[in-house]
Amino acid sequence: MSEGSGTTRDITRIEAPYRRDVLLQDVQHESGLRMLRMRIREGRRFTILDIDEATAEKWADVMLKWARKELPDDNGDTVAD
C-alpha cells in the first residue's frame, strides 16, 4: 500500500479487549526513514502513533516484562503473583 511519499505495509491486526482493534504497519518513507505505525480503533475513534525503531524496542521490552510479571516494584523487587 502506498501513502504519499513512501510505502506502508500491514504487519498484523490484533483484536484487543473492549472491542478495540490494533493494526501495526511498517512505514517506509522515501527519505529512508522507517517507522512503526500503530492504528488503534475504538468504535469511531482512531489513535495513530508512529514510532522509531529505538522506541519500538524499548516499548516491546517493557511490554514483555509486564506480560511476564517481571517488572520491578517501587522497591526494585520483581513483581510476581
Image (spheres, rainbow, N blue to C red):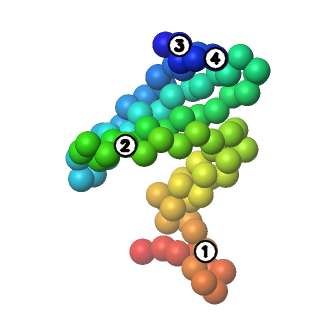
Label 4 neighbour load within 10 Å: few <14, some 14-19, many 20+: few
Q: Where does label 4 land, which residue?
A: 5
Q: Position of residue 42 (x, y in %)?
A: 29, 47
Q: Nearer the viewer, mark 1 or mark 3?
A: 3
Q: Amino acid at mark 4?
A: Ser
Q: Nearer the viewer, mark 1 or mark 2?
A: 2
Q: Residue 81 sits in which quadrant? A: bottom left
Q: In the picture shown, does residue 81 fall above or below 57? A: below
**In this view, the mark in front (1 or 4):** 4
Label ID, residue 2 = 3
Query: Among all residues in the image, which is located at the extreme right?
Result: 31
Instruction: Find residue 15 and report its horizontal and vertical position in percent.
Output: 30, 40
Frontmost residue, 42 versus 80: 42
At horizontal 59% and vertical 34% (from top left) the residue drawn is 36
Q: Residues within 10 Å of mark 2 (few under 14, many from 20)?
A: few
Look at the numbered disc 2 and give the secondary structure of its residue: strand
| Labels 1 and 2: the sequence-earlier one | 2
Residue at mark 1 to residue at mark 3: CA–CA distance: 42 Å
Dot 3 falls on a residue whose secondary structure is loop
Picture coordinates of residue 61 (x, y %)? Answer: 62, 52
On the question of residue 20 being in view, the answer is: no
Q: Which residue is mark 2?
A: 46
Assess whether mark 4 and mark 3 are in contact (beta carbons under 8 angstroms): no
Using the rendered image of the protein, determine whether residue 36 is visible from the camera's viewpoint: yes
Residue wearing tag 1: 72
Residue at 68% in and 39% down: 52
- Taking the image as shown, residue 77 lies to the left or right of residue 48, namely right
Q: Secondary structure at mark 1?
A: loop
CA distance for labels 1 and 2: 32 Å
Determine whether, in the image, residue 52 is placed left or right of residue 41.
right
| First reached walking from the N terminus: tag 1 or tag 4 | 4
> How much space separates mark 4 and mark 2, taking CA atoms?
22 Å
